Image (spheres, grey):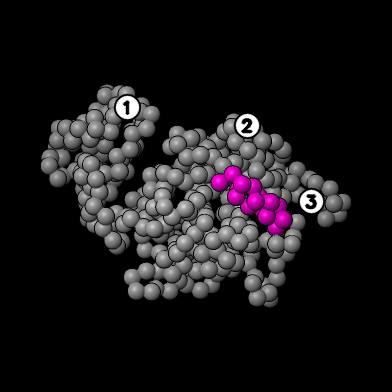
Amino acid sequence: MVTREQVIDIVRVAADEAGFVGAAAQFRDVVVKDGQVSMTVLAEAGERQAALEEALRTALIGAGATSVHCRFRLPNEAASVATDKQETPVKGHGGLLEPTPLLSPESGTKFIAIASGKGGVGKSTVTVNLAVALARAGKRVGLIDADIYGFSVPDMMGIEERPQVDGDRIIPIERFGVKVMSMGFFVEDNSPVVWRGPMLGKMLRNFFAEIEWGELDYMLLDLPPGTGDIALDVHQIIPQSQEIIVTTPHATAAFVAARAGAMAIKTEHAIVGVIENMSYYVSTQTGEKEYVFGRGGGARLAEQLNAELMAQIPLGAPDNHPAEPDFSPSVYKADSETGQLYAALAQRVMEKI
């Protein structure tokens, strides 16, 4: 099976043969696991970029790689360039990550990425309420809204203010005892974020390198749905992260969510468990449970991933009123039935991690 050292030698030769001689193409974040190769390529854009990618893929597959994933960045998008053995940490936008206390193994922070196979299953709602439940249990909690395109956490938590800057560090917003950072704090009037993949990774890295998180027990990351660049960046930046997969009971949602679980397994991220959201609806007329999205999807997904079905959350909305001082559209009160389900879920997460 191809090794990392072999990959580095192969890509250099392939780049030279494709006409990217010397510094015309450089490589970093080279990861080889079970024959799967991923890397970041610094090269100028244009038609030649596609030729380079094809040359790298052909050479690596020929050498024994089972799959090849290349992410391209322009050379001027990176503040420093990685060598074949190490990367030079550079502080600032677009740079590589500095060693930060939060990411060091000695920090004791537990990282939990919340993932789903598709949108619309309530992943962000689950993330927000799990974070709040952990904070209510006395834990120091951070939350990164890593869904750069579909950021929603600030609105869900009723956050209207913007982060402050202290020297060269950004102070996260604290709400319900949770320290929060989101792309939503940096755009005006709900404007769309029109970025290519490499820029997403840069923003995620800055969320670690430039934010003053302090000491945390848990850091939750609300991932975008699917298995795109952000999910891959999380797996590379935070190899110690664990994952929770969110689905609905519907068979198709569970089928798609299995892909997110499979990605976690392939990148050696432990799956903490599965949460089935919108499991049922309690009728206001009869008080009976109505299974509007079917039944069994969460259990089947948990069995497929050899994981625990940690919670089944009903379909509903918090009984919150805009006039309340701590109003938020999506955070359940601690004494509500759903709030108590999230408290039990938080307790189970603390037991497992």
- Please tell me how crowded label 2 is: few (under 14), some (14-19), or many (20+) other residues with Cα within 10 Å: few
Observer-nearest residue: 26 or 193?
Answer: 26
Badge 3 amino acid: Val
Question: Marks 2 and 3, how far apart in space?
Answer: 26 Å
Question: Marks 1 and 3, how far apart in space?
Answer: 51 Å
Observer-nearest residue: 239 or 30?
Answer: 239
Q: Earlier in the sequence, mark 2 or mark 3?
A: 3
Q: Earlier in the sequence, mark 1 or mark 3?
A: 1
Label 1 or label 3, whichever lies nearer to me, is: 1
Question: Marks 1 and 2, how far apart in space?
Answer: 30 Å
Q: Position of residue 77 (x, y in %)?
A: 26, 55
Q: Position of residue 170 (x, y in %)?
A: 40, 69
Region rendered in magenta:
339-353
Determine whether the residue tagged by mark 2 lies in a helix, strand or loop.
Answer: helix
- State whether residue 279 appears in this view: yes
Vertical placement of 173 versus 36: above or below?
Answer: below
Q: Position of residue 276 (x, y in %)?
A: 65, 44
Asked which quadrant contains residue 183, the reply is bottom left
Determine whether the residue tagged by mark 1 lies in a helix, strand or loop.
Answer: loop
Residue under label 3, please give it.
282
Q: Which mark is residue 65?
A: 1
Residue under label 2, please give it.
303
Badge 2 amino acid: Glu
